[in-house]
Image (cartoon, rainbow, N blue to C red):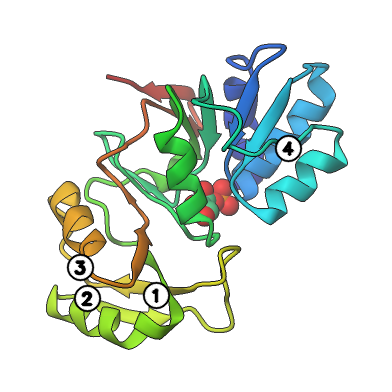
Amino acid sequence: MSAERLKIEAARAALKEVEDGMILGVGTGSTVNALIRELEVSGLRLEGAVSSSRETTDRLEAIGVKVLDPNHTGDLALYVDGADEVDAHRRLIKGGGGALTREKVIAAASRRFLCIVDESKCVDILGEFPLPVEVIPMARSLVSRKLTGLGGRPELRDGVTTDNGNWILDVRNLDLVDPLKMETAINQIPGVVTVGLFAQRRADEVIVAGEGGIRRLTA
Ligand code: 5RP
C-alpha cells in the first residue's frame, strides 16, 4: 500500500472519533490534509475548527469549515495531528512542516490529542528525524551555539519563515533517549520559541496505519 493510502486509512480511523457540532483542533501536514479531504466527504458538520497553520486554515475554509480564534474557544475536546516520528510511549517529533509552535499550543489546549501516522513514522528512539526548533531571528546564532553545546548539529532551514515570523533550526545528532529532559533543556534557551519534541504533552493516542491494518498506541 502506498504511503498516501496509509495516510488516508489513518485519517479515516481518526474521523470516526469526530462528532457533529465539535470544535476540532486541526494540525498541519499531508496526513492532516488527508483528514481534511475525508472530513469534506463525511457529511460531518463541525461548529468550527482551531487551525495550526495558514495552510490548514486555507484548506479548512475551502471546504466550508469556520476557523476560530483559540483565544475564544477555551479548551478543545479533540486535537488531531500527524507527526514526523513517534515512539512507543507516544512521544513525538513534530515540526517538519514548520507549524510546531501553534501545534504545541493547540495540543496543550486540548483534552485529547489524537496523533495519526503511517507506520514509517514509528521508531524505537526518537532522533533520526532532525529536531525542529523555532527561534526568534535575532537569537539564531546564540541558540545554535547552545544546541551545539548540547551535542547537536543545528542547521538553519533555508528560506523558511514560520507563520509566527520566526526561523527554524533543524538539529541532528542530539541524544533523545530522555526526550522530556531534552525538551526541558532546549525550552530554557533564551530565544527558543518552541522545540518540536512533544514529550511533556505527548499524544494521548496514536493511530498507526500499516500494511496489516490499523493499530493504536494507548495508555
Ligand atoms: C507539521 C508537523 C506534521 O505533523 C509532520 O511534519 C508530519 O507531516 P506529514 O503528515 O506530512 O508526514 O509537525 O509541523
According to the picture, the residue beneath numbered tag 1 turns out to be 169
Asked whether residue 131 is in view, the answer is no
Q: Which mark is residue 67?
A: 4
Pick whichever of labels 4 and 2 is earlier in the sequence: 4
Residue type, numbered disc 2: Leu
Residue 87, quarter of picture: top left
Mark 2 and mark 3 residues within 8 Å of each other at the beta carbon:
yes
At numbered mark 4, what does the secondary structure look like: helix, strand or loop? loop
At numbered mark 1, what does the secondary structure look like: helix, strand or loop? strand
Q: Which mark is residue 147?
A: 2
Q: Which mark is residue 174?
A: 3
Decide: few, some or many residues near mark 4? Use Cα within 10 Å; few <14, some 14-19, many ≥20: many
Return the x and y of residue 206 as percentages of the image width and height: 41, 29
Mark 2 and mark 1 residues within 8 Å of each other at the beta carbon:
yes
* 4 or 2: mark nearer the eye: 4
The answer to which of 118 and 34 lies nearer the viewer is: 34
Mark 4 and mark 2 residues within 8 Å of each other at the beta carbon:
no
The quadrant of the image that shows the N terminus is top right
Label 2 and label 3: CA atoms lie apart by 9 Å
Pick whichever of labels 1 and 3 is earlier in the sequence: 1
Is ligand 1 closer than 8 angstroms to the Cβ of mark 3?
no
Q: Which mark is residue 83?
A: none
Left of 161 or right of it: where is 217?
left
Return the x and y of residue 5 as percentages of the image width and height: 66, 38
Mark 1 and mark 4 residues within 8 Å of each other at the beta carbon:
no
* 2 or 3: mark nearer the eye: 2
Decide: few, some or many residues near mark 2? Use Cα within 10 Å; few <14, some 14-19, many ≥20: many
* 3 or 4: mark nearer the eye: 4
Q: Residue at x 77, y 39 (%)?
A: 60
* 1 or 4: mark nearer the eye: 4
